[in-house]
Image (cartoon, coloured by chain):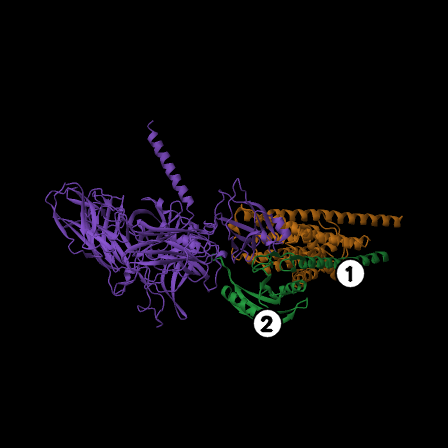
Amino acid sequence: MFRSKTPALIEPPINGTNPRPYAPIWTRIITLVAIVSAIAGILSTLRLVSPALLTIPYANAVTVLLSLLPIIIWASLSIRQERSVSQPRVALLSIGFTAFLTTYTLVLPFIDRIFTTNQWLPLASAVDRILGYTFTVGITQTGVVYALVMLLAWRNHVRYRDDIIAYCITAAVGYTTAENLYFLSQYSSLLDAGATRFFSNLAVSVVSSLILSYGLTQTRFDRASSVIMPFTLIISAILIGIFTPLQSGLTSASLSLEPSVPRPLLGLGLALAIVVAGIAITNWLLTSAENRAREAETVAFMDEYS
Amino acid sequence: MKSMPLLMLFVLFSLTTSAMVRAQDLFDVERSKRATVFITQVENRGATQITRCVGSGTIISENGLILTNAHHTVRSESCPGDLLIISMGITPDEPPIARFRAVVAQADRGLDLAVLRIASYIDGRLINPETLSLPFVSPGDSTGIQLDDTLTFVGYPTLADDSVVTLRGTASSFLNEPIPGIRSWVKFSNEIPGIGTGGAIYSAAGELVGVATSAYRIFPGQDASAANCVRFQDSNGDSLVSADDVCIATGQPFGTIRPINLARSLIRASLLGMQILSLNQGSGTTLTSESTKPRITRIFFAASLNDAGMPSSVISSLPVGSQSLYLFFDYENMTPETIYEVKVTNDGRPNRIFSLEPVRWSGGQKGMWYIGSTNQVWPNGVTEFTILVNGEIAASQRIIIGSADEATPIFSDVAFGLVDNNGNLLGNGYILPTGGTIASARFIHRNMAQGTEWTAIWYVNGTEIPGSRQSNIWQGEPDGAATTSVEAGSALPAGSYRLELYIQGRLAATSDFIIAGIPRGAFADVFPNPRFVGSTSSLPPDFTTATPSNNYPDQITALYALFDWQQIAPGTLWTLRWLVDSDVIYDQTSVWNAGENGVAFPVQLTTAQNVPDGTYRIEILLNNIVFASASAQVGIGQLPIDLLGQSEGVQLRGTIIDAETGQGVSGINFILISQDFSAAEYFAARDESMIYALATTDNNGVFVISRPLELSTEDNEIAYSAVILAEGYLPMSADGLVVDEETPDPIDLVIYLTRD
Amino acid sequence: MIQQLTSSRWSHVFTTIVIIAGMGVGFFLRDNALTEVRIYTDIQFGITAFYPAAWSVSSSTSYPFRARNLTERGFPTTIQITVQTVPDTISPRQVFDTLSLERLQTLASYNVISSPVNITLPDGSSASVVEYAYADSEADPFLERIPSIIRGQDVVTIRRGQAITISFLSDEKTYDANLSTFEEFLQRLRL
């Protein structure tokens, strides 16, 4: 889908431009997270400072727009960046679209009706909730991202490490958008609460996908042990399993005879902390792995040359 | 020093203001509004129901007792409906919506007070009263009302179009009548809408102290606009709402209040679920037919009353600053459905303070009546009293207030008795035993110049006793006491007697007395052998063979009070009073209709279940004097403590909101755990015996805990726990929920539920 | 390269296994949570019942056992056992009639929707089943709630001079979903 206008030749690096033939991925992720978190933060602050400002016409339509924001931002950034490189990631759209459709029509109804998480998980004990969310929502979500990348990109479209990250994040964004819309199809939501929920969904999806993509890159490029991939998938699922109850627990108001209100900023802070930490750690892991691989290649090349 | 008066004024103002603020703080307007109901009496006509009478009422117990008037609830000729519909607003600011059906638990048609009991939902389903938890106000004490005290009316102003209104005013006067006696009425300075009859009157401290009472009725051939007639239903099935349809009297603005203490016996009997019924078919007031028109005669004024409610003397003027004035009159053919009204004018200007708006007649069928007040300054000028009966002027009389205090000859303070050999008057003053041939009256005289012509006329049962008229010339001292007597050839018969004393052809004093009973010294024994008989069956025992006792086990289903009677003339007013543990639960004055002599007059006390433990007492009175009494103990001889206990504490309600949507969540259970358990213990056991109260949210997420939360004190700390468990939401729980004196009542919680 | 491909293949195999196994654990946890039961024993009436662990249990003078799902939104699904001493000659039909007369007084739009059907309880004894429905409306006049249709089922068995009525009540919308809970309850009930 993404067509390059330039010939497939590596251009000489110009100051400040991408020396590689593929589009960078980290800035795109950071931009996406920054925009969505900023919107959620502004709306949540407005709720505390001046709730009247959030009473706007067509609020429901705006909330739907907010739910679509991750995929809109991701798509616009991707189109712009992939068009400007010689080797665009052509499977991005198909993965994103398939992730969205599959999640909305199959995965979420499956979680809702087969796992019936709403019936038993919110009322379970803390440990049961973490385990429950890990082995229902977590494992399903990471499984879907993994399956989509494996089915639609693994064989033909993965050339570099960043490709895996890009496809995983795209699948995660598609999943998140479907999750947001699925929620809105069942419940209405206030602007700020919706924005917070959408950002939280995005944050946990992005981080779990980054962890997953680390496992995939290790499997694909670093001859890692065959248990690394399932291990990272489990870690991804556990992250979702921990984050979901922790976030709702932090946000929840307390019950007392005194007035008590929810604390959306705490939830927002947690999501932001997780996404920042997640991006930093996975970036370091992936960059280190790439550097190690490059050094190994250089050593191998030098050995071969000598 | 110059600023001292200013400083004192400031301090005084501050104290007054703070006292007013405190009083306002005590008056929970919202609670009183929520306890207010709209009552509709409807008549079933096949498939249609026709509204017949309307009014307001107040819930006085959480299980659905409602205090209101009798005239628009008890079935009568003017209100022939057979179904009472109770409506209330969902919020205090909304017009009422029909919710329940009620039945009359207790009523006194003369006092125009009734206590209703909610019996079923509007669709006819029966209600277990114990499951009801309605907002209520406890009856207060009306004896504390003083002139010019701030009072607040709470009731419905229109025929179901508006929400509850509150009107502030003051107690502008107290009016006295023979029945129920002192403070029969409190006058309210503000105008209460006619439809607000039955509504509540609160003191500044928020106590329920009265019932707004006025009875309008549409009489055939009279202008219906006087009763503010409203037609809104096609009652005759002609597909038109026209003048041929049933008209509902919504009344004119009024200011008459029945003090709450007059309703105490009705409320207590209702709370105990007791019914008292005279089984003697001849007893009670006989209703006269409408063709027999009520009459008011012999209308005169008196400056004061004596203990028996008789005029001290007859006057035609009062000096400046007079604080007591009574209008006396004779009445006949009156019934509890009779509407009577007293209009007072001063120099032609209406005087609302001392006027009585249309009310139900609270006296008997025939006798002497008074209305007036004490300890209130009457304005100078020509004061005219006009009595209206059933909307028509029946009599009027004028008196001049503010005239010079002239030394006119006066007779006053007539008392009756038997004169002993030393000339002393024996007896209680107004009840004489039969058997004597002479009845004597002692009276006070003042300013009686020698040679003044005076006359004494004696009557029995409204007829002048032949030969009793004594026209005399005054020979004695100007001031002092004198005696006059009537002597018959044979024993004076039992009956109602009257003495009229005239000075120079002017009625100067008058008083009634009763001759009844067998002599016991100078006193009369009218109701001998009062006793109790208990029954374990639903059928009355054979009173002729039943053995009386003053001690019964706690399994009896009915208690009968019996007494014999001797030498009491039909038509005599008598009072029957029941007390339980010294508290009056029944007090009814009626006309004696059971013949002159008899045995075993039965009065039955029943309850829904067994007669509760307690000490029961019956008193039979004539002219407010107890002539017979008896007591009996049932069970341990004391009412169970919780039987009359009204639940007290803080009401808890709230709204459960979805934190994400900002909207109320329906169908969520709010579980309040009793003080003995924690939320964790409930989570672990899921045992409902740990639950203090359970409430479910409505469509708007609103819930109301039915049981009030007990107040925690230093000696007895009560800490509740609460749990909210709902699928899809994070559970919420809290321990150590304590309510104390400082806690607002009701507690309004806003709870945000978070989705996982 | 071959080793890398082999490693990659095994990795995907393991991952797939982990996903499937993880979801299996999820199902296990779900079933464990939803089918967990507690035991209730009443020596006086000889009742041993297994009821859902998340439900709240109670007993009173009018019923020896009642379990309700108070976590459910709206009308809580209820299983209740009542015991009434009856003459030996009484039939389940007469018990149903008595129940119907009582309910007509207190339940709105009460309607029996099936004739008594004879069934055999797990312990081999015979019982009769009747289904009915009524409208459950808000008792508090200050709350606004649209009445909900409640569907119920009475299982009546007469033994040892006692009419034992096992009632199941649920909102009409969730009746079918909750019926399996009642059937499970009946299977395990010891009277």
Frontmost residue, C37 versus B227 = C37
- Residue B351 locus on image (x, y percent): 25, 50
The chain to which mark 1 is attached is: A
Residue A155, numbered label: 1
- Residue A113 locus on image (x, y percent): 65, 62
- Report the side of C35 relative to B194 (left or right): right
Q: In the figure, B147 relative to B396: above or below?
A: above
In the rendered image, the residue lying farthest to the top is: B1
**Would residue B659 be visible to someone looking at this image?**
yes
- Report the side of B232 relative to A136 (left or right): left
Q: Are marks 2 and 1 in contact (CB under 8 Å)?
A: no
The chain to which mark 2 is attached is: C
- Residue A4 locus on image (x, y percent): 71, 59
| Chain with colour orange in the figure | A
Quadrant of the image occupied by residue C115: bottom right
What colour do you see for chain B? purple
Which-is-in-front pick, marks 2 and 1? 2
**Would residue B166 be visible to someone looking at this image?**
no
In the rendered image, the residue lying farthest to the left is: B451
What colour do you see for chain C? green
- Residue labelled with disc 2: C116
- Residue B701 locus on image (x, y percent): 53, 55
User: Gap between marks 2 and 1, in whole Å?
Assistant: 65 Å
- Report the side of B417 relative to B453 (left or right): right
- Binning the other alpha carbons within 10 Å of mark 1 as few (below 14), some (14 to 19) or many (20 upward) gives few
Q: Quadrant of the N terminus of chain B?
A: top left
Q: Quadrant of the C terminus of chain B?
A: bottom right
Frontmost residue, A25 versus A34 = A34
Frontmost residue, B586 versus B635 = B635
